Image (cartoon, helix red, strand yellow):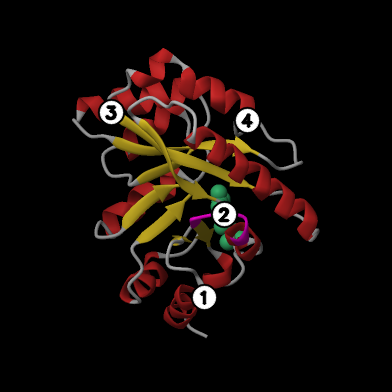
Amino acid sequence: MDIKERIKQLRQELPAHVKLVVVSKTQPVERIRQAIEAGQQAFGENRVQELVPKFNALPEAQWHMIGHLQTNKVKYVVPFVDLIHSVDSLKLLQEINRQAHRINRVVNCLLQVHIAQEETKFGLTAEEVARLVAQPEVASLAHVCIKGLMGMATFTDNEKIIRQEFRTLHSLFEALKHQKLPANAGMEILSMGMSHDYRIAIEEGSNMVRIGSAIFGERK
Ligand SMILES: *Cc1c(COP(=O)(O)O)cnc(C)c1O
């Protein structure tokens, strides 16, 4: 099946409140263009070196940064990025704000939460998220807007584990929604679910899924 057909099928399957981010990492511009022709707008990339040239080739698309972002690379993505899914420190948020201020933009961000069992240095714990949004410093960052949370479940076939992790992230999202947040933060977007687990993620409250291989085929 071709890319356009897969996207159309997926769009029919997804509930109307769930936004599809097509993960185009490692895919050439030609294949991304096919997705755009199918009406797709939002694309996710996990490396700055890939994101910037793809934006330059296809500026009509909305570009999301979904991978770990180093502070020294922030300046390259801030001019055009639609949403950064992977904010996991105050330092990174401050640098995004600083670069966005220079060009008078407000950059939309999600806080990445570590929910999986796998060891990784990326992502905040639930407590760290709560602490971060409560910091007075965050409220003063006028050029960032925190839109919600992002998380990745453990890479496993065990559906119970995946479901439990998504459920944990969803309850944090709901809890924060009812907490007093600074004016530049709101809990609107819950980005969870990839090719192998997006159905579970949606059942557990996701409203943004990031799907690559289910559209383009397995990456080499
Ligand atoms: C690669 C990637 C995805 C998409 O993974 P697929 O299994 O190809 O759907 C989603 N989110 C992040 C953060 C990724 O790095």
- Which mark is first along the chain, 3 or 2? 3
Asked if disc 1 and disc 2 are in contact, CB closer than 8 Å, the reply is no
- Dot 3 surroundings within 10 Å: few (below 14), some, or many (20 or more)? many
Task: Say which element carries label 4.
Answer: helix
The percent coordinates of residue 202 (x first, y second) are: 58, 60
Task: Say which element carries label 3.
Answer: loop
Asked if disc 4 and disc 2 are in contact, CB closer than 8 Å, the reply is no
Magenta segment boundaries in residue numbering: 203-208
Query: What residue is pinned by disc 1?
Result: 13
Disc 1 versus disc 3: distance between alpha carbons? 36 Å
* Quadrant into which the C terminus falls: bottom right
Q: Nearer the viewer, mark 3 or mark 4?
A: 4
Query: What residue is pinned by disc 2?
Result: 205
- Dot 2 surroundings within 10 Å: few (below 14), some, or many (20 or more)? some
- Dot 1 surroundings within 10 Å: few (below 14), some, or many (20 or more)? few
Is 197 placed left or right of 65 in the picture? right
User: Among all residues in the image, which is located at the extreme left?
Assistant: 104
At horizontal 47% and vertical 24% (from top left) the residue drawn is 133
At horizontal 36% and vertical 28% (from top left) the residue drawn is 96
Query: What residue is pinned by disc 3?
Result: 143
Disc 2 versus disc 3: distance between alpha carbons? 28 Å
Task: Say which element carries label 1.
Answer: helix
Q: Nearer the viewer, mark 4 or mark 2?
A: 2
Which is more toward the observer, 54 or 159? 159
Residue type at tag 2: Gly
- Which mark is first along the chain, 2 or 1? 1
The percent coordinates of residue 145 (x first, y second) are: 34, 34
Q: Which mark is residue 73?
A: none
Residue 140 seen in the figure: yes
